[in-house]
């Protein structure tokens, strides 16, 4: 009988430990949820090439560029953040910071980073030439030229229109463009407790040879 009672006793101890552990996690989850901020967003469209309304150059005598294409293999994904709800029972002031947005794809984390060198190719292509004016125009067109943080107070739901552009490198030259253009990747936020909610907007997809213009850039 002792040989039977020992495992029963062990199972009881294990069960008590599991209940205690689960309750502890539940308490922590409830505590975090009471301060949770809800951010609602859309993944609006994926694209490969952007064309300026007018050519851009760094000086009157420098080369003029009509646009930029994403550095391949990769695709640009445009998200719009449309509202921030800070209504938890123990809500505290929240600062929405564009630089804390990121995505995960194939175990790779890709953060919002604007337009760093190497993320795009000039159109028309000019080898070894970097254009600060092109980078500035892209930032202005896509992000309004700035990175102003948004403050959301407790018990407040704030409509916003924050556009987030992420270059998603695909990791292999042989990934079909069709797969890239239809890529669906959740937008995440590097802070807790934050709940990211996709509003269910039907994502648009541009073909590889289709150009996006400023009039195409989405709002909420």
Image (tube, rainbow, N blue to C red):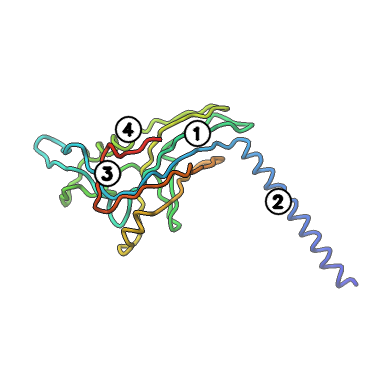
Lower sequence index among marks 3 and 4? 4
Looking at the image, is mark 2 or mark 1 nearer the viewer? 1
Q: Which mark is residue 212?
A: 3
User: Could you tell me how far apart the alpha carbons at marks 2 and 1 are, in whole angstroms?
Assistant: 30 Å
Judged from this view, the residue extending furthest toward the right is: 1
Residue bearing mark 2: 22
Q: Which mark is residue 12?
A: none
Q: Is residue 187 above or below residue 18?
A: above
Q: Is residue 55 above or below residue 151?
A: below
Q: Nearer the viewer, residue 75 or 12?
A: 75
Q: Secondary structure at mark 2?
A: helix
Lower sequence index among marks 1 and 3? 1
Q: Secondary structure at mark 4?
A: loop
Looking at the image, is mark 3 or mark 4 nearer the viewer? 3
Residue bearing mark 1: 84
Looking at the image, is mark 2 or mark 4 nearer the viewer? 4
Q: Report if the CB atoms under discs 3 and 2 are less than 8 Å apart.
A: no
Instruction: Using the rendered view, name the quadrant where residue 63 is placed.
Output: top left
Residue bearing mark 4: 144
Alpha-carbon neighbours of circle 4 within 10 Å: few (<14), some, or many (≥20)?
few
User: Could you tell me how far apart the alpha carbons at marks 2 and 4 are, in whole angstroms?
Assistant: 46 Å
The x and y percentages for residue 135 are 25, 40
Q: Report if the CB atoms under discs 2 and 1 are less than 8 Å apart.
A: no
Quarter that holds the C terminus: top left
Residue at 63% of width from left, 31% of height from top?
90
């Amino acid at each position: 009988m002792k040989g039977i009672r020992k495992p029963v006793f062990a199972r009881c101890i294990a069960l008590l430990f599991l209940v205690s552990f689960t309750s502890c996690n539940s308490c922590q989850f409830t505590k975090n949820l009471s301060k949770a901020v809800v951010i609602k967003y859309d993944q609006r469209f994926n694209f490969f090439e952007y064309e300026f309304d007018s050519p851009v150059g760094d000086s009157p005598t420098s080369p003029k560029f009509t646009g930029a294409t994403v550095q391949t293999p990769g695709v640009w994904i445009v998200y719009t953040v449309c509202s921030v709800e800070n209504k938890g029972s123990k809500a505290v002031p929240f600062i929405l910071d564009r630089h804390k947005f990121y995505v995960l794809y194939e175990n790779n984390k890709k953060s919002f980073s604007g337009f760093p060198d190497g993320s795009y190719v000039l159109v028309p292509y000019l080898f070894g030439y970097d254009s600060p004016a092109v980078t500035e125009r892209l930032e202005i067109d896509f992000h309004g030229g700035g990175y102003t943080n948004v403050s959301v107070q407790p018990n407040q739901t704030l409509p916003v229109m924050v556009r987030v552009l992420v270059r998603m490198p695909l990791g292999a030259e042989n990934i079909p463009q069709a797969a890239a253009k239809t890529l669906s990747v959740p937008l995440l936020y590097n802070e807790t407790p934050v709940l990211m909610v996709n509003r269910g907007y039907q994502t648009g997809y541009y073909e590889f040879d289709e150009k996006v213009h400023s009039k195409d850039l989405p709002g909420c």
